[in-house]
Amino acid sequence: PRDRMPDNVLKKPPPATAAERFALGNPAGLYDFLRALRYAVPVELYDQWSPYIAHALTQAVGLPLVEAGAEDASCDAEVEALRRDGLAEAPVTLDAEAVGQARAHLARFRVRDAWDRVPGEWPLDAVPMDVNVAAYDSAAAKTCLPLMMLANHPQILARVTKLLGALPTIDNVGAWWSLPGRKQAKDAQLFHIDRVCYRFVKLFIYLTDVDMDSGPHVYVAGSHLHMQTRRRLEEMKKTGSKDFARFAAMYQSVRKDDRDVFDFFGDDKVHRLVGPAGSSFLVNVGGYHKGELPKTRSRLIFECTYSLLPRLRGVYQAVANPAFFDAAQARYGDRVSREQLAYINRLVVTP
């Protein structure tokens, strides 16, 4: 064997200079800055920033907003519930036929470890026991017509638009199985928050029946109001509360202990979302949430993330899905234009 690799293998190309990264013709520098800014701004200030971003975005995009129709009387109340509590039932669901179509479509694909800790891809019945969550490649969800149609339903888009204050960007779609029989909860099966954007919301659709034993989504109502949490912690510090250090550590941690969360917010704020296959709900996952480890039955779920701005993490790979655009135009054309759909879905699917 050779004891020395050639110089041209050892040497890496020099990193781009700051001037090159931030040249006007190179968007990478802007992406780096916007991504850094999102984490530099304290999460408690996101709600103060987001109206200005939404206003500027609406002016820049130049498309009309998706608004609730005259028949959609519950839109305002559900958006208010999202602002107050962080969660609300979605106004539309998948019927049994659409659920069957979605599951049949996904079954054509293999799954992988959602957190990439265990390498490989497997059929669903061969997932290793050290994998808690088995995810489909995002292309599986992007090409699933029933799921993409519901994610772009005018009543869903009207609520999301009103909440964000601008036309949303669908930043990501995906589907995964949470599997029973595992030793302990891992990763997103522990309480945490997401920081996708300054303001964002996710749509979840159950594709299996979900009860208390099959891994319901768990959400702490009101925990997305981080300024309130910060003020409460500051008051605890001022009064010398014996629990201040414990709860301050919880607030700063990436994964949060169940008991700390329950004690701080109260058991009555913890919602376990159960329902039959086809159930859907909107959640501000900037609040404390987790997908509970199933006890007896697997759970299949679809997720769609709506944000003001792309999260700018990783590589976006939109797939061509002309069938979706044709179907959406035929069904929703009087409420959502093709141009609006192209903008909203540009990171995930194209005509």
Image: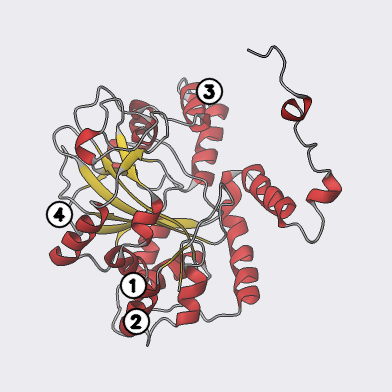
Kindly state the secondary structure of the residue where label 3 is placed: loop
Q: Which residue is at 19% across, 48% downward?
A: 274
**The C terminus lies in which quarter of the figure?**
bottom left
Query: Which SS class for mark 2?
Result: helix
Q: Position of 224 compared to 270: left or right?
A: right
Q: Which residue is mark 2?
A: 332
Q: Which mark is residue 153?
A: 1
Quadrant where the N terminus sits is: top right
Sequence-earlier tag: 2 or 1:
1
Asked if one can make out residue 143 in the rendered structure from this viewpoint, the answer is: yes
Tag in front: 2 or 3: 2
Who is closer to the viewer here, 237 or 28? Answer: 28
Indicate the amino acid at tag 3: Gly
What kind of residue is marked 2? Tyr
Marks 2 & 1, CB-CB < 8 Å contact: yes
Label pair 4/2, CB-CB below 8 angstroms:
no
The quarter of the picture where residue 269 lies is: top left
> Between marks 2 and 1, how big is the CA–CA gap?
7 Å
Q: Residues within 10 Å of mark 1 (few under 14, many from 20)?
A: some
Q: Where does residue 10 sit, x and y in percent of width and height? A: 73, 25
Gap between marks 3 and 4, in whole Å?
46 Å
Residue under label 3, please give it: 240
Amino acid type for the residue under numbered disc 4: Pro
Residue 102 image offset from top left, x and y in percent: 23, 60
Residue 276 image label: 4
Q: What amino acid type should be assigned to the residue bearing mark 1?
A: His
Q: Residues within 10 Å of mark 3 (few under 14, many from 20)?
A: few
Instruction: Answer with mark 1 or mark 4, whichever residue precedes in sequence.
Output: 1
